Image (tube, helix red, strand yellow):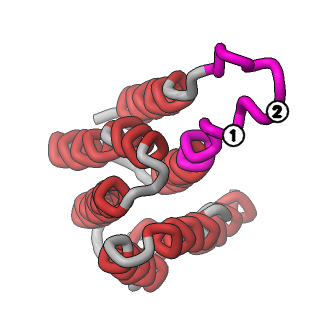
Amino acid sequence: MNKNRLEAFSDGVLAIIVTIMVLEMKVPHDGGNTLAALKPILPVFLSYVLSFAMVLIYWNNHHHLFQLVKTINGKVLLANGHLLFWLSLTPFTTAWMGENHFAATPVAVFGTVLIMCGFAYTILTRVLINIHGENSELARAIGNDNKGWISVIGYLTAIGISFYNPIISCILYAAVAIMWLIPDPRIEKRLKGKNHAE
């Protein structure tokens, strides 16, 4: 089964997700021609920046992951759809969190969606490894996924803290995002090796 349609569909869905998120930022109309008029929408903007970074990270790592993928099947399509489902909830949780000025429950729900995205991505990588084999280039690149487990611990901690201090939770979400901003170095190394071999 060809992977190109899966990648094209995923790219399209992620582009729509980002578009929906940016449309949630409403332009101020009453006295809206000064910088002070932007102050009420600052929480919405900050939640958008955080969410945009998260979606960008998933797109970036998804792209790198699929450069090592040789073949896909129906299970991969379902696992990829599962990931896209959780990512598609990002605009809702982003808007809810921003419009409620980082209140505890929206921040916790945002984190829950993030952790489900992480689990969905892990499921996708496991399904791909099952197809390609435990000794495949893909399996060797993924390795033991310590970075993924650190992310899960970070998200769980942030969700727990959100009911006491939602701002610290958001800082933890941002820290996880910063950790993933550079494309997965394990896959980068394999791709460089592959290119040199060719």
| Viewer can see residue 90 | yes
Q: Considering only vertical position in the picture, is 76 above or below 36?
A: below
Q: Which residue is mark 2?
A: 35
Query: Would you name the residue on which mark 1 appears?
Result: 39
Disc 2 vs disc 1: Cβ atoms closer than 8 Å? yes
Q: Amino acid at mark 2?
A: Leu
Q: Describe the element under mark 2 as helix, strand or loop.
A: helix
Which residue is at the front of the view, 15 or 94?
A: 94
Q: Residue at x 57, y 46 (%)?
A: 43
Up-down: is 95 above or below 83? Answer: above
- Residue at (41, 36) in percent of width and height: 91
Image quadrant in which the C terminus is located: bottom right
Q: Residue furthest right?
A: 34
Q: Which residues are magenta?
A: 27-47
Rendered residue at 51%/48% (across/down): 51
Residue 65: x and y in percent read: 48, 56
Assess whether residue 44 is covered by the magenta stretch: yes
Return the residue nearer the eye: 197 or 37.
Answer: 37
In the rendered structure, which amino acid carries the disc numbered 1?
A: Lys
Majority secondary structure in the magenta region: helix
